[in-house]
Image (spheres, rainbow, N blue to C red):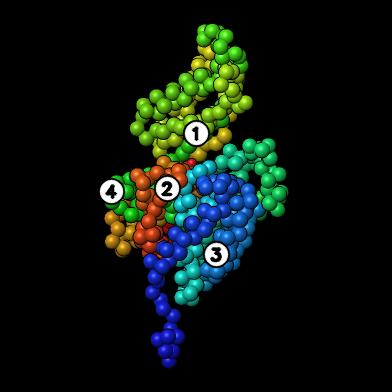
Amino acid sequence: MTTMQEQTDLTIDFATMSNQIMERVDVLALHTEQEGMMTRTYLTAAHRGAAGQIAAWMRDAGMTVRRDASGNVIGRYEGTDPGSPLLMTGSHFDTVRNGGRYDGPLGILLPIGCVAEWNRQGKRFPFAVEVVAFCEEEGVRFKAPLLGSRAIAGTFDTRVLDNVDDQGITMHEAMLGADLDPVHLPTAAVARGKIAAFVEVHIEQGPVLQEEGLALGVVTAISGATRYMLELEGVAGHAGTVPMMSRHDAAMAGAEIALFIEKRCNAAPGLVGTVGQFTVPNGAGNVIPGRAIMSIDIRAGEDTLRVAAADDITMEIERICARRGVRANVKKTYEAVSVGCADWLQQRWTASLQRHGCAPRSLPSGAGHDGMIIAAIAPIAMLFVRCGNGGISHNPAETMTAEDAALASRVFVDFVENFEVPAAGQA
Ligand code: HGY
Ligand code: MN
Ligand code: MN
């Protein structure tokens, strides 16, 4: 008969687990490429340092770890039935420039903490659990988002390998420099049927849960998006001598386009438009801008709304540029349709919330996530965790609490411990 001491304590100390999650978010945030701010873009030294740290935590949690051909770091916690489809979870470890530290890492570190507890207890499931640290979701360095999930879904578009970063380095060169050869990318693909479900824990990046005093929410759908890079070619000239009516000012054309985007997107609820980048290359205060470069990001939960707005905006770009004698080079850099979360998975998340005394709140995601790509090969779902500071994100003021991390961990453990791989065709 084993004594109490020898028996494994099967209770999980979620307060300690969540404090460790929060501490690890801060440790991961030290891997940044801009001193004093959170910037970690694809395959930079900071990105590779973070990958190594995540791999170490995965191993400590009892997982085997592999890096796939795109740079995803994948921890695997074996199940008892090697033939069973697996439960995949995870999130991304790249960030936007001067962003927040929870957007992505929470969805990696929380599952790692839960696996460590299951491993400590010697608890195994009939299915393997894989925690994926997706290598590139934001699309900042090479203007090509969701690379890691595309590699797993088998939809990686190799044309982006020629995209260059601000230093003129191609993605191909950056991958080779990180000991990743794009020729092996097909080996990262996972066939449909191998993954029973992909579930991601992520901060809401919006104000809804905080405004309603709720810690957690179940995501119904992930909004689609259309993105462009716009290059405007006008005529540079002397700021003091060229009469206003004779100018072909690339930046003023861009400003008029940006104001049209704002007006058009204000015209329909649920439609949003953003000009996140707007530069005058080699500009000077006393020179009329001959060139301007701007990004355009259009989103809506309803695809028809988004597509109609994108069409109106590209037509208006032509009209504005024709009137101003400015040439526009419009390049669509990204388009993703809105993706629904699987009803049966939403119901399971809602049941887990209710078992832990949480009001079952469902809500759409205006932000994009890797799940919209993984949905091509597996049913997806997401658990949102409340953000503080009015839900601000993609901003250093992004924040959340250890208490909400603890509740999210409880609900995540409940979800996995009650998960059953659906019989073929049942889901
Ligand atoms: O842009 C997005 O929606 C996500 O944060 N990559
Ligand atoms: Mn994110
Ligand atoms: Mn983000």
- Which of disc 2 and disc 1 is earlier in sequence? 1
- Which of disc 4 and disc 3 is earlier in sequence? 3
- The residues bearing labels 2 and 3 have C-alpha atoms spaced at a distance of 24 Å
The label on residue 398 is 2
Q: Residue at x 57, y 9 (%)?
A: 241
- The residues bearing labels 4 and 2 have C-alpha atoms spaced at a distance of 18 Å
Q: Residue at x 53, y 13 (%)?
A: 324
- Which of disc 2 and disc 4 is earlier in sequence? 4
> Which image quadrant: the C terminus?
bottom left
- The amino acid type found where label 3 is placed reads Trp
> Is residue 308 in view from this perspective?
no
Q: Secondary structure at mark 3?
A: helix
Comparing labels 2 and 3, the label whose residue is closer to the camera: 2
- The residues bearing labels 3 and 4 have C-alpha atoms spaced at a distance of 34 Å
Q: Is residue 205 left or right of residue 250?
A: left
The answer to whether the beta carbon of the residue marked 4 is less than 8 Å from any atom of ligand 2 is no
- The amino acid type found where label 4 is placed reads Glu
Residue corresponding to mark 3: 57
Mark 2 touching mark 3, by CB under 8 A? no
Q: Nearer the viewer, residue 226 or 174?
A: 174
Comparing labels 1 and 2, the label whose residue is closer to the camera: 2
Residue corresponding to mark 4: 212
Label 4 neighbour load within 10 Å: few <14, some 14-19, many 20+: few
Q: Nearer the viewer, residue 425 or 118?
A: 118
- The residues bearing labels 1 and 2 have C-alpha atoms spaced at a distance of 18 Å
Q: Is residue 293 above or below residue 366?
A: above
Where does the image place residue 154, in percent across and percent down from the top left?
60, 48
Residue corresponding to mark 1: 276
Where does the image place residue 146, in percent across and percent down from the top left?
55, 45
